[in-house]
Amino acid sequence: MRVSEALEKSINEGAIGVLVLFLVISLLPVFVREFRNSARLILAYWFVVALHQCVAFTNTFLFKTIGSTTDAKNFNISAIGYAQNQNFFTCVDCGRYTSLFENILGFLYWIFGSSSLVGSQLSILAFAISCIILVKIMRLLELSHYKVPALFVFGSLPSMVLLGSITLREPYQLLFFILVTYFGLRMLIEKNIRVYGVLMVVSALVMGQLHTGLMIIGVIISALFFVWNPRPTSSLLSIKKRHLKIFFVTLMLLTGTIYLTKVQHVDLGVISEVINLDVQYKTELFQYRTRTVTGRATYRIPLDFSSPFMAANSYFLLYVYYLFAPFPWQINSLLDVGASIESMSRMILLYFSVMHWHHAYGVQRRLLMLMLILFFGMSFMWALGTSNYGTAMRHNMLSWWILAITGVPLLMKMLSRFWLGLKQYVDGHIFRAS
């Protein structure tokens, strides 16, 4: 399709919706207090959003970028079908997370117009809201002085730019994971379970509807926030009576859900899929996939369950490859170079995140520990179902923001020793890790 034909098609299909979404995305920081007080923060926001917009318009009018020709294309085609037929949430497979996402996307297409550019704008809007919440989380962690570089690092990651600008589930999964964390932190800091506890659980449930694994991790994260003690203590967990009450009520609800799905055979969508999950089958399926798929980016690490030690060793190797592959000796193309740069960035920021927690103290130390637990939990969950570093780049988007806000402050402090401008920037703030 020529550029003129693509432009005409875009004008006819959803141009008004694209314009409305584009304006909302651009003006969003103006209505947020943290952004209004910092011109540099607004500029950083516009910069990372501009990168995403370049990818979106390139996909529409010039050529297809990396990652936009497989799942993103299929999601877009299916959503357009739902929008044209207007039969939202009436299909037999609506309980599946993929079909549910397509239904929601189709409903949004029905409102704003059916075109891939509208889908891209919706993904960028999810990313933009994530940027807003990320800055608010940094304020809760008392790291607001580093919000500009953290936002830049978070939003300019190549895979974030390329895959966060097309019709994939990841931008929405990322948004709701950040929302779960934000509401959980507000609940801990302000001790308001009735409001922020409910919002956290609702966000976790919505996140879980986008993937089976996210339903599991959402339940774990919610439980962790309920029992976590942000105050310094000799024990890792300090459970209060009211938290125990909430835990037992949640346990009763979960037991009732299991009864409905297993005994009464009630279909509750993704929740039913989680409860009826056959771990052995999923593991065997993963082993088969790793043995049969021989792509360039495949790990080639079959899981070995012959003994507990071998199983633990397999999981460890799988997790290391998930976080840091491709290694230097595996680089064979330009794409491998980009993936390797991301993995090295992840390694560097992970180191500084751990050191930041090690040097911090008081409430901040406890909250940074909680953030690291969230990172390792989310990344390990994805690692169990990932067999190549191409897919790992896509999944690592969901936990990258944690490294950005916990690792960048200490990295900035280290770089300030060699760069006078950064030293002046850092000296303007009393760094809690010093």
Image (tube, rainbow, N blue to C red):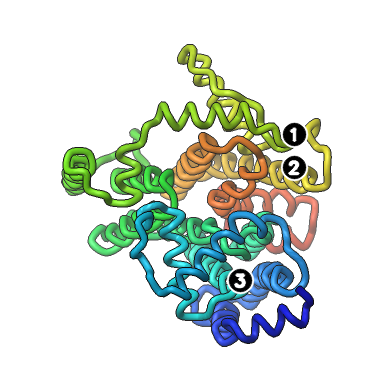
Q: Is residue 10 positioned above or below 353 on the image?
A: below
Amino acid on which disc 2 is placed:
Ser
Q: Nearer the viewer, residue 227 or 93?
A: 93
Amino acid on which disc 3 is placed:
Ser
Q: Locate residue 16, reporting x and y percent.
A: 57, 87
Q: Locate residue 96, reporting x and y percent.
A: 40, 52
Q: Indicate which disc residue 340 carries.
A: 2
Label 1: which secondary element: loop
Crowdedness of circle 3 by 10 Å Cα count: few (<14), some, many (20+)?
many
Using the rendered view, name the quadrant where residue 82 is placed.
bottom left
Q: Locate residue 4, reporting x and y percent.
A: 77, 82
Q: Locate residue 72, reporting x and y percent.
A: 60, 59
Q: CA distance from mark 3 to mark 2?
A: 30 Å
- Tag 1 residue: 327
Q: CA distance from mark 2 to mark 1?
A: 7 Å
Q: Is residue 254 positioned above or below 67 on the image?
A: above
The reply to whether callout 2 and callout 1 are in contact (CB within 8 Å) is yes
Label 3: which secondary element: helix
Asked if residue 15 can be seen in this view, the reply is yes
